[in-house]
Image (cartoon, rainbow, N blue to C red):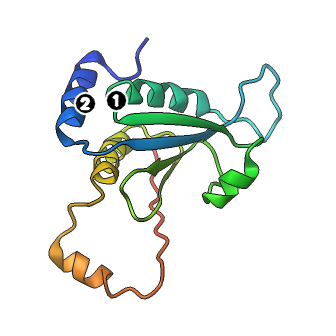
Amino acid sequence: MAIIPQQDQEYLKGLFAEKLEHPVMLRFYTQRQSVLSVPGQECGTCSDTHALLNELVALSDKLTLEVHDFVAEQEQAKAEGIEEIPAIVLEGQNKGTVRFIGVPAGYEFATLIEDLIDVSRGTTSLQPSSREVLVTLEKPVHIKVFVTPT
């Protein structure tokens, strides 16, 4: 059974065909599936997130999914600032790093779609006044946005 309804898949195919300009790599950090469960180390949303991302990348040839084992590839995860899973790193024309921690469901799914487009284009829809303020920053800035399910 599909996670993304067929009608939404058709809409996203059209949106991606129109708006994605350059390829985007989605690096997904997860854990290997196992029949054993180690308390405190299980990822309850990794499997669903993986299925969602598989469906999403199938909607455009400009989207690619690369899957990484968080435990086996700890050094790479750490280098990318990944400390929790599931985690998604978007790589395209963007200058900074865009990371999603957790499953991008509900309203966060729309944010992921917008970010895929922005990363593909290498730009955002920020207002000129916001750009003027940001250009004055002298050091890198790490912005975290927290959301809670409702």
- Left or right: 18, with 8 as reference point: left
Which residue is the extreme one toward the top? 1
Determine the image quadrant of residue 38.
Answer: top right
Q: Quadrant of the N terminus?
A: top left
Q: Quadrant of the C terminus?
A: top left
Q: Is residue 108 above or below residue 51?
A: below
The residue beneath circle 1 is 61
Q: Is residue 123 above or below residue 27?
A: below
Residue 150 visible in the current orientation: no
Q: Is residue 138 above or below residue 101?
A: below
**SS at badge 2:** helix
- Left or right: 93, with 48 as reference point: left
Residue at position x 23%, y 76% in the image: 130
In this rendering, the label closer to the viewer, 2 or 1: 1
Residue 4 image offset from top left, x and y in percent: 35, 23
Residue at position x 63%, y 54% in the image: 82
Who is closer to the viewer here, 40 or 25?
A: 25
Label 2 – label 1 distance at C-alpha: 12 Å
Q: Amino acid at mark 2?
A: Leu
Residue 128 image offset from top left, x and y in percent: 16, 75
Tell me how many marks there are. 2
Which residue is the extreme one toward the front? 22
Residue at position x 72%, y 30% in the image: 32
Marks 2 and 1 in Cβ contact (< 8 Å): no
Residue 115 visible in the current orientation: yes
Residue 30 image offset from top left, x and y in percent: 64, 37
**SS at badge 1:** loop
Tag on residue 12? 2
Residue 81 image offset from top left, x and y in percent: 61, 60
Q: Is residue 121 above or below residue 3?
A: below
Determine the image quadrant of residue 28.
Answer: top right
